[in-house]
């Protein structure tokens, strides 16, 4: 019985390796962390992630947790959220944190970069309408600034509004005083973060995992 279960798990892991680019060893390590977080249950809940001490003081804690349950990040081609995820869904989210493998073509590297930026975009497009509007942007900026504890909410709101207008001028040019800015589309997001070094900024230290061990591509 044990040997049969082991063979089944190895077959499942091999299938996941083929689809994600992780090696069997990497998947095994991620599975161990998943089991720790889920208390050895088959599924992981929001409460399980919320219990991670390293997330307590993170200003975008709510967005990080929600990202693991967002159907857009689970390759389900639909919007909305789920209440719990299994290991395979957890692994799919983890693919967004993989450093690029050596030897990727320029096109492959750019596609990987777009996937990671799409993941970041989805974190802040909370209503899944394809646009980060002023209210969503303001919420993020207010959370980031309020955690610093040095400014009030009204000041944070004013900074957020000014920052959104700056984004608008970058993506659309000069706007009239009474012109309404719908928000940031994904293409705008790519333009704004054109020089952003995504490889060094996206990590999973809050899961107590070394990002280097998640390098995309089969290990030798």
Image (tube, rainbow, N blue to C red):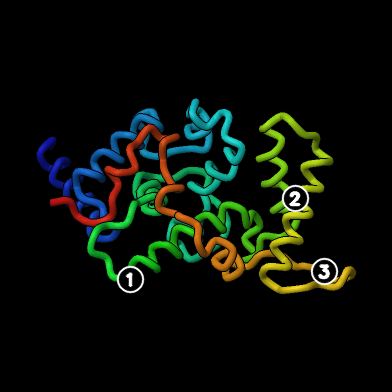
* Label 3 packing within 10 angstroms: few (<14), some (14-19), many (20+): few
Quadrant location, the N terminus:
top left
Q: Secondary structure at mark 2?
A: helix
Residue beneath disc 1? 106
Q: CA distance from mark 3 to mark 2?
A: 16 Å
Task: Please report the residue visible at 78 percent of the width from the left and 73 percent of the height from the top.
Answer: 174
> From the viewer's perspective, is 197 left or right of 153?
left
- Mark 1 / mark 2, whichever is N-terminal: 1
Residue count near mark 1 (Cα–Cα under 10 Å), binned few <14, some 14–19, many ≥20: few
Q: Do callouts 1 and 3 mark residues in contact (Cβ within 8 Å)?
A: no
Up-down: is 216 above or below 56? below
State the SS at label 1: helix
Residue that mark 3 sits on: 180
Q: Earlier in the sequence, mark 3 or mark 2?
A: 2
Which residue in the protein does label 2 denote?
160
**Residue 162: quarter of image:** bottom right
**Residue drawn where x is 50% and y is 61% of the image:** 195
């Amino acid at each position: 019985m044990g040997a049969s279960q082991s063979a089944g798990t190895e077959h499942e892991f091999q299938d996941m390796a083929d689809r994600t680019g992780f090696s069997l060893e990497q998947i095994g390590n991620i599975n161990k962390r998943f089991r720790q977080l889920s208390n050895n249950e088959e599924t992981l809940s929001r409460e399980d992630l919320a219990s991670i001490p390293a997330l307590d003081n993170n200003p975008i804690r709510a967005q990080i947790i929600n990202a693991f349950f967002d159907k857009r990040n689970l390759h389900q081609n639909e919007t909305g959220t789920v209440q719990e995820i299994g290991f395979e869904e957890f692994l799919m989210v983890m693919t967004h944190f993989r450093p690029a493998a050596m030897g990727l073509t320029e096109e492959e590297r750019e596609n990987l970069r777009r996937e990671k930026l799409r993941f970041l975009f989805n974190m802040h497009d909370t209503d899944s309408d394809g646009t980060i509007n002023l209210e969503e942007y303001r919420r993020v900026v207010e959370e980031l600034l309020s955690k610093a504890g040095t400014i009030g909410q009204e000041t944070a709101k004013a900074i957020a509004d000014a920052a959104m207008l700056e984004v608008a001028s970058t993506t659309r040019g000069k706007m009239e005083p009474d012109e309404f800015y719908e928000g940031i589309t994904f293409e705008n997001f790519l333009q704004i973060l054109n020089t952003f070094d995504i490889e060094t900024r996206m990590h999973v230290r809050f899961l107590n995992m070394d990002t280097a061990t998640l390098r995309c591509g089969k290990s030798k």
